[in-house]
Image (cartoon, coloured by chain):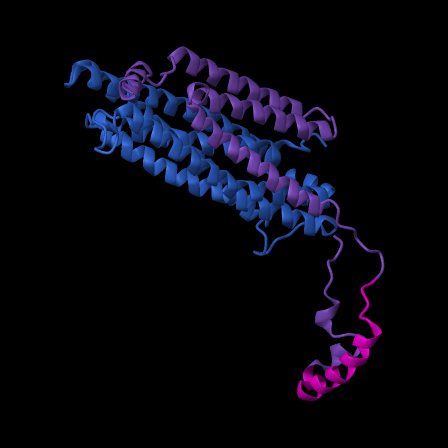
């Protein structure tokens, strides 16, 4: 019984094939949106320029996905796959920016802890005896060069 | 939607649905591949705002805009080709034999796929012209990169993101053009079994198009007025 119902359902549901008219309509809309995004880029609006550019791009991609990629008539499983991609992208972006945007740039120079300095000094002298070539540059620095690597402000 | 489904599918409809789901999952992984590049860009934008604006003024907005229009048009061609291939497959399924009408649809699909190949190659050619002028202007990071000293680091970051994003996109375009060309040959020979392949290649092509749609304002437009 259930098999028969299943079969009937399948015969009735053929994939919706879009009409030429709707495809061309979407294409024309996309071109209009392209012109809109170019024009808006030359009007100084500050941060709104970026947001507008991205918003227009999102509308374009929405049109491409729903009509060209048949998402409008797609199965729920396919929609879930597409939505899952967007959801995990959001998670990835959120976590990444939760890190980048909350990093604090310290004003002070990085300094080795005192105990570490006293331990590093004899080690440096020993290294200088082995590699005397490095002595000139190394003498100007209170700590080994490698420990002074810190992020340079542009 | 192939004329005859593979043995392990109940129906052609089932086969089409499975292929579509598989393709969307693949496209999701493609997004995971591209979006970190967008995040890297956004991070640079936050850190080097002024330098990004300065660097962006050196990209070619005209070529970028023309290339966007080319890709949008190529997506239309693919969509029409997919439609024709699906109609051909549907007819060959219901009629169970080859007819002049099926041939007509297949030839139309093949023609639109060739048009897509042409537009794709045109896109890549314009991209090459752009890369060439950027090379001449010393805008390629690490390879004798030259930029005004106050914005050097940020501009280097911008061009690194620019070449990574457009480069990876171009590689995808080359793959797409090869796939579409192969299918155009097959459909031109009157192969009605390729409707699924055409539909899946179409999804891939639209996805690459959609990624470019987001690249375009970020790399060519934003900060243009300043």
| Between B104 and B143, the one nearer to me in the picture | B104
Percent position of residue B37, x then y? 57, 44
Q: Residue furthest top?
A: A21
B159 left or right of B31 in image: right
Percent position of residue B126, x then y? 47, 36
Residue at horizontal 37 percent and vertical 25 percent from the top? B78
Residue at horizontal 73 percent and vertical 72 percent from the top? A145
In blue, which chain?
B
Work out whether residue B182 can be spotted: yes
Find residue B120 and report its image quarter.
Answer: top left
Image quarter (top left, top right, bottom left or bottom right) of the N terminus of chain B: top left
Q: Residue furthest front?
A: A1
- What residue range appears in magenta? A109-133
A25 left or right of B85 in image: right
Residue at horizontal 33 percent and vertical 36 percent from the top? B179
> Eyeballing the image, is A154 above or below B28?
below
Percent position of residue A61, x then y? 52, 26
> Eyeballing the image, is B92 above or below B113?
above
| Between B17 and B65, the one nearer to me in the picture | B17
Residue at horizontal 23 percent and vertical 28 percent from the top? B5
Work out whether residue B58 can be spotted: no
| Between B109 and A14, the one nearer to me in the picture | A14
Image quarter (top left, top right, bottom left or bottom right) of the C terminus of chain B: top right
The majority secondary structure of the magenta stretch comes to helix
B22 left or right of B4 in image: right
- Chain A, which colour? purple
Find residue A39 and report its image quarter.
Answer: top right
Percent position of residue B81, x then y? 33, 22
| Between B43 and A31, the one nearer to me in the picture | B43
Whether residue A124 is in magenta: the answer is yes
Whether residue B146 is in magenta: the answer is no
């Amino acid at each position: 019984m259930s098999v028969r119902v299943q079969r009937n359902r399948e015969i009735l549901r053929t994939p919706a094939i879009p009409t030429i008219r709707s495809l061309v309509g979407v294409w024309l809309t996309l071109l209009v949106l392209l012109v809109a995004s170019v024009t808006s880029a030359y009007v100084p609006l500050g941060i709104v320029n970026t947001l507008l550019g991205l918003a227009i791009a999102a509308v374009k991609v929405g049109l491409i996905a729903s009509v060209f990629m048949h998402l409008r008539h797609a199965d729920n499983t396919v929609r879930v796959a597409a939505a899952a991609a967007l959801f995990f992208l959001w998670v990835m972006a959120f976590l990444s920016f939760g890190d980048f945007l909350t990093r604090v740039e310290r004003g002070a120079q990085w300094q080795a802890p005192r105990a570490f300095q006293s331990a590093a000094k004899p080690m440096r002298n020993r290294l200088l005896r082995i590699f005397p070539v490095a002595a000139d540059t190394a003498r100007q620095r209170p700590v080994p060069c490698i420990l002074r690597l810190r992020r340079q402000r542009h | 939607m192939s004329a005859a489904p593979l043995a392990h599918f109940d129906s052609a409809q089932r086969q089409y649905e499975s292929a579509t789901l598989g393709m969307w999952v693949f496209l999701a992984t493609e997004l995971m591949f591209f979006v970190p590049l967008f995040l890297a860009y956004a991070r640079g934008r936050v850190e080097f705002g002024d330098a990004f604006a300065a660097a962006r003024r050196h990209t070619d907005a005209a070529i970028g805009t023309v290339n966007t229009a080319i890709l949008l048009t190529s997506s239309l061609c693919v969509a029409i080709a997919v439609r024709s291939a699906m109609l051909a497959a549907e007819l060959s399924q219901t009629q169970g034999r080859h007819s002049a009408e099926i041939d007509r649809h297949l030839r139309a699909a093949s023609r639109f796929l060739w048009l897509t190949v042409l537009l794709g190659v045109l896109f890549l050619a314009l991209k090459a012209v752009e890369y060439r002028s950027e090379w001449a202007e010393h805008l390629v990071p690490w390879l004798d990169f030259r930029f005004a000293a106050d914005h050097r680091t940020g501009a280097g970051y911008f061009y690194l993101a620019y070449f990574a994003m457009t480069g990876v996109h171009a590689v995808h375009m080359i793959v797409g053009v090869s796939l579409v060309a192969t299918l155009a040959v097959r459909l031109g020979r009157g192969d009605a079994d390729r409707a699924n392949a055409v539909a899946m290649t179409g999804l891939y092509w639209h996805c690459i198009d959609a990624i470019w749609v987001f690249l375009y304002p970020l790399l060519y437009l934003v900060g243009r007025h300043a």
